[in-house]
Image (cartoon, helix red, strand yellow):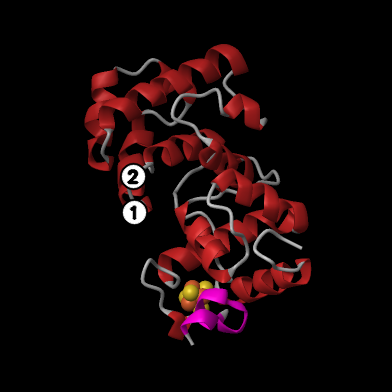
Amino acid sequence: MLNGGRKVQDVNTIFRLLSAQHPNAGSELEFNDAFQLLVATVLSAQSTDKRVNQVTRVLFRSFSTSALLHTANAREIEKIIRPVGLHKNKARSLTEIARIIEDEYGGTVPSKMEDLLRLPGVGRKTANVVLGHGLKLHAFPVDRHVLRVCNRIGLSEHTKAHSIELELTSVLDPNSWLQMSDSLIIHGRRICKPRPHCGKCRLTLCCRYFDEQA
Ligand code: SF4
């Protein structure tokens, strides 16, 4: 039994329904490799994927690798990434990330959670995005959408991202982690928004919030 009172079978049913509703769920950030995804995900904090993609199309023309970004002029980076907000902090994080990857990891994005968490501006969600989408490893990113949808459906009572990650990864097949996370994120962005569009949702029969509103 999960913390939200759900059985393991319920989680798998919800996974199937979400996958059916969002068959093409995946990262909406544009990238060619794990380093570019790391950069894009750091830039996405308090911004939108659409805006980040507009910025990285320009940024990666000149600074597509850690070696190139490491030697970049911080002012130039700030100017390019300004539209995503927090540009001074993010520029500092990106050049430092590039330096650490060059100096300590031989230019390769590290593939361990603890190493990724050492990088400035990288939290658990960003690290999981890079592990899952960038390096094709088992990972379960939890953002505010995953939190909201899980709490509403009754998949978990936890309000901390790491607790939800631990709870759901303890019952789901590791091969389903990333797809479940991607589906929950898209569901939260498009349907189970802060004001949920329950009329468009396939989960009404297994959603606690919907039950309580009926
Ligand atoms: S039924 Fe409504 S509240 Fe429940 S998951 Fe769907 S959109 Fe969200």
166 w.r.t. 96: above or below? below
Residue 76: tell me if it is visible: yes
Residue at 36% x, 48% y: name it.
53
x, y percentage for residue 126? 51, 39
Q: Residue placed at 55% from the left, 67% from the top?
A: 24
Counting labels gives: 2
Label number found at residue 50? 1
Q: Secondary structure at mark 1?
A: helix
- Residue 30 lies, in percent from the top left, at 44, 48
Report x, y in % for residue 114: 64, 27
Which of the two residues, 68 or 123, is positioned nearer the viewer here?
123
Amino acid type, label 2: Gln
- Is 209 magenta? The answer is yes
Residue tagged by mark 2? 46
State left or right for residue 135 relative to residue 173.
left
- Identify the residue shown where x is 54% and y is 39%: 33
Say if 56 sits above or below 15 in the image: above
Picture disc at residue 68: none
Q: Where residue 149 sits: x, y (%)?
A: 51, 64
Would you identify the image quadrant in which residue 127 lies? Answer: top right
- Inter-mark Cα distance, 2 to 1: 12 Å
Q: Secondary structure at mark 2?
A: loop
Q: Indicate the amino acid at tag 1.
A: Lys
- 45 in the magenta segment: no
Q: Residue at x 27, y 34 (%)?
A: 86
User: Considering only vertical position in the picture, is 175 above or below 189?
Assistant: above
For the magenta stretch, what is the residue range? Answer: 204-213
